[in-house]
Image (cartoon, rainbow, N blue to C red):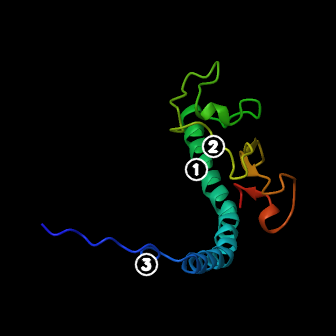
Amino acid sequence: MQRKKNRVPGQAGFTLIELLVVMVIIGLLVALVGPNVMGRAEKAKPQAARVQIEYLASALEMFNLDVGRYPTEEEGLAVLRQAPSGVERWDGPYLRKQVPKDPWDRAYVYRRSGKGFEVLSYGADGATGGSSADADILSSE
């Protein structure tokens, strides 16, 4: 049997300088890439809201086909998961999961309109109007 030679301390492993250089490189990559990734996530939220609103609008159309009317504002989007009282032809649930919140963690707004209904999210600022990420996102768009 051969015995392994004992290593001399200081010859094995990484030096402190090498570790610091690697840490600086990692820090630079995070500083350069991090803001780009975060910026893309914020830009994706309005698109995610549009997709969810289309999903809700499709479910509302199915409700209308079965029941013969759109939900009242008092019934809201909850009728897509739970049958309202006094409705005989409800054939739901029309959503697989609970009614989603918008990407900014707020409830979607449902209201009746001349076209039947409107589902909307008030955007990043949570207030009516706005532009860019703060703009309202409507099902009628």
| Residues under numbered marks 3 and 2 in contact, where contact means CB atoms less than 8 Å apart | no
Q: Residue at point 80% right, 53% down?
A: 122
Label 2 neighbour load within 10 Å: few <14, some 14-19, many 20+: some
- Percent across and percent down for residue 85 are 64, 19
Which amino acid, by three-letter code, is at mark 2? Answer: Pro
Please report whichever mark, 1 or 2, sits nearer to the chain's N-terminal start: 1
Residue that numbered label 2 is attached to: 100
Q: Which mark is residue 85?
A: none
Q: Which mark is residue 55?
A: 1
As drawn, which residue projects farthest toward the top?
A: 86
- Judged left or right of residue 52, residue 116 is right
Residue that numbered label 3 is attached to: 11
Q: Is residue 76 above or below residue 137?
A: above
Which amino acid, by three-letter code, is at mark 1? Answer: Tyr
Q: Is residue 137 above or below residue 89?
A: below
Query: How many numbered marks does the figure carry?
Result: 3
Q: Residue at point 86% right, 63% down?
A: 130
Please report whichever mark, 3 or 2, sits nearer to the chain's N-terminal start: 3
| Residues under numbered marks 1 and 2 in contact, where contact means CB atoms less than 8 Å apart | yes
Which amino acid, by three-letter code, is at mark 3? Answer: Gln
Q: Of helix, strand and loop, which one carries label 2?
A: loop
Please report whichever mark, 1 or 3, sits nearer to the chain's N-terminal start: 3
- Judged left or right of residue 53, residue 12 is left
